Amino acid sequence: MSPRFDVIVCGSLHLDIVVHAEALPRIDETAVGSAWEQVCGGKGGNQAVQAARHGARTAMIGRTGDDVFGRTLRANLASAGVDIAAVAVDGETGSGMSVAILQNNGDYGAVIVSGSNLAIDALALPEMWTALGGAKVLVLQNEVPNPVNLAAAAAARCGGAIVVLNAAPARALTDGLLDLVDVLIVNRIEAEAMAGVSVHDRSSAIAALHALGSQHRSVIVTLGGDGLVLGEKSGGGVEIVAVPVKVKSTHGAGDCFAGVLAASLAKGSPLPEACQTANARAAAFVSRS
C-alpha cells in the first residue's frame, strides 16, 4: 500500500518574535529597533509549510503548549495545508518560542526557548508514523531531542521512506542515527562541527563531504551566497552555484531549502535535480519574491 503522505516532518514548532534593528546589540548595550513582528517558525514547522507549498501532501509530528502561541502555530500549519493530527497539545509545558534580531543587511541572530518541543514522546513515534499512514520522505532537524529523531528515523526506514536530516543546530548525534539517514543537510558551521574540517569555500566544503559521507548517505553542504556542494552516496559530486538575488532576509532560508528538497524527492526527482529546485526556491525566498 502506498504511503498516505509525500512528506512527514518530525520536529520543532516555535513562535518567533522578530525584532528589526540596525545591528545586534553588544554586551550591556540596549539597542533601538525599528519594528517587530510575530512569525510562526521552528525549523520543523517551517519545513513542513514549505513542503506543502511546493505541492507535497505533508503532515507534521510535533508538540505545542496549550496556549496562545500553540494555537497560533497549529492554525498556521493547517492554513498551509499541513496535516496536524500528530501535533500533540501539552497541558503542562508552554510552546516553544524564539526571539530573533534581524539586521538591516539581512543577517540575524536568535535565542530559542524549546518548551514543549522537548516533551515529544519518542516511544510513541512508531505508532504516530503508522497512524498517519507513512510518507515517501521523512524530514528531521536538531531542535527536538535525539531519541525523538532516532525513533522517527527507525520508523520511517521500516516503512521504506527516504530519511532527510537537516543537522541544525549543530550538536552531537545519537549513536546510530546517521546510519538511518539517506540525505544529510548541513551548512558550513554544522559541517565544521561534525566533520572537524574548516569550511570557508567550495573546495573546503568538498573536503567536508568526504568526512561526512559514506556509501549509505548523501551529503549536502549549503554555503549561502556561494551555493552548495552535493556528495551522493554513489560517489559523485556536484557543485551548484547560488542564484543571484537581492537579499532581504536570510531568516528561514535553510528551512525553505530542506522543505522544497523533500517535496521534490517525494515527487521522484533525482537528488541533484531536487537540489537545483530547492536552491532556486531558497533564493526567491531570501529575496521575498
Image (cartoon, helix red, strand yellow):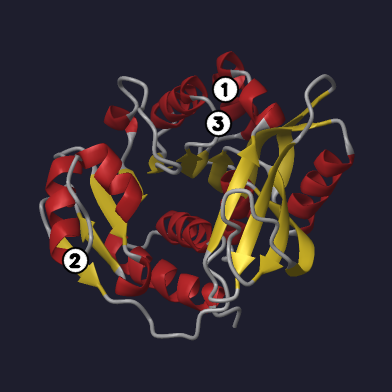
Residue 227 vs residue 190, the one in the foreground: 190
**Residue 167 percent location from the top left of the image:** 40, 41
Could you tell me how far apart the alpha carbons at marks 1 and 3 are, in whole angstroms? 13 Å
Query: Is 280 situated above or below 180?
Result: below
N-term mark: 1 or 3: 1
- Residue under label 1: 125
- What amino acid does circle 1 point to? Leu
The residue depicted at 52 percent of the width and 41 percent of the height is: 135
The residue depicted at 78 percent of the width and 64 percent of the height is: 36
- What amino acid does circle 2 point to? Arg
Q: Secondary structure at mark 2?
A: helix
Question: What is the crowding at mark 2: few (fewer than 14 residues within 10 Å), some, or many (at least 20)?
Answer: many
246 on left or right of 118 = left
Quadrant in the rendering for residue 188? bottom left
The residue depicted at 85 percent of the width and 22 percent of the height is: 91
**Residue 62 percent location from the top left of the image:** 66, 34
